[in-house]
Image (tube, rainbow, N blue to C red):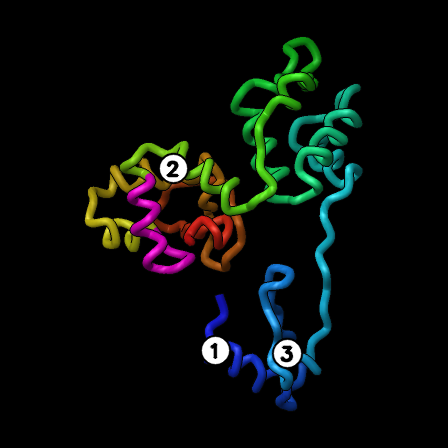
Amino acid sequence: WGDQDSLLLLSELATAAIRDVVLLGAHRAGEFVPPAALDAALTPVELRPLSPEDIGTLLAEVCGTTAELGAVAAEFHRRTGGNALHVRQLLRRAQRDGMVAEQALDGRATWDLRALAAIEITADVAEFLGRAIDELPASDAATLGALACIGREFDLTDAVAATASAPETVAQSLWSALDLRLLESVDARGRRIDPVIDRTARYRFSHDRVAE
């Protein structure tokens, strides 16, 4: 979401003789053409999709190692193409719908591969997130829409002011969005923290397409 003035500022900073400064930016493939003055100073770093091994490591960290982990990771990769956002949302669906369960005897997880393969997902990020938004009650979706008007990051006080609703009502809406991974909690330094409703916490959209 870089406006023209911001891009001009980045161009000036990138071409100025400033020592010990690193400028970081991110954009979706095919959606940004840098100005000529900025292009010469750029060092592109392409983020690759997650591999089946990467997904297996993630699933082992979140759910624990299981005998079928290799097959589960391969199914995740087949369904998502390694897109990290899709992997996260597919994992949430699997946890919510009981496709991964912890065994009482040894605490290890087991997966229902047949049910996992039946989950309907889409390759389009906007539609994928739109389906998550559709899971929200109408009042919570309206709150999310109002929050999109005040910027990507905000706190509980900002949210209450933007929606003109009671703090308890806004807190419930925020929690619903956090549960669906449409929002994420961050600390004062912008670092992601566990989901929490607190006046000292800040919140931001998990993806710019949510705000769109």
Residue located beneath label 1 in the image: 4
Which label belongs to residue 175? 2
The residue drawn where x is 58% and y is 33% is: 121
* Amino acid type assigned to the residue bearing label 3 in the image: Val
Of the 4 image quadrants, the one containing the C terminus is bottom left
Q: Secondary structure at mark 2?
A: helix
**Given this view, does label 2 or label 1 mark the residue nearer the observer?**
1
Query: Does the magenta run of residues contain 68?
Result: no
Quarter of the figure with residue 120: top right
Left-right relation of 42 to 90: right
Return the residue nearer the eye: 104 or 51.
Answer: 51
Question: Is residue 110 depicted above or below 150 in this figure?
Answer: above
The residue drawn where x is 52% and y is 82% is: 8
Query: Does the magenta run of residues contain 144?
Result: yes
In percent of width and height, residue 45 lies at 72, 64
* Amino acid type assigned to the residue bearing label 2 in the image: Trp
**Given this view, does label 1 or label 3 mark the residue nearer the observer?**
1
* Residue at the far top in the pictured view: 105
In percent of width and height, residue 147 lies at 33, 52
* Amino acid type assigned to the residue bearing label 1 in the image: Gln
In percent of width and height, residue 39 lies at 67, 79
Marks 2 and 1, how far apart at CA: 35 Å
Numbered range of the magenta stretch: 141-155
Marks 2 and 3, how far apart at CA: 37 Å
Marks 1 and 3, how far apart at CA: 22 Å
Residue located beneath label 3 in the image: 21
Q: Secondary structure at mark 3?
A: loop
Quarter of the figure with residue 43: bottom right
Asked if residue 210 shows in the view, the reply is yes
In percent of width and height, residue 160 lies at 25, 49
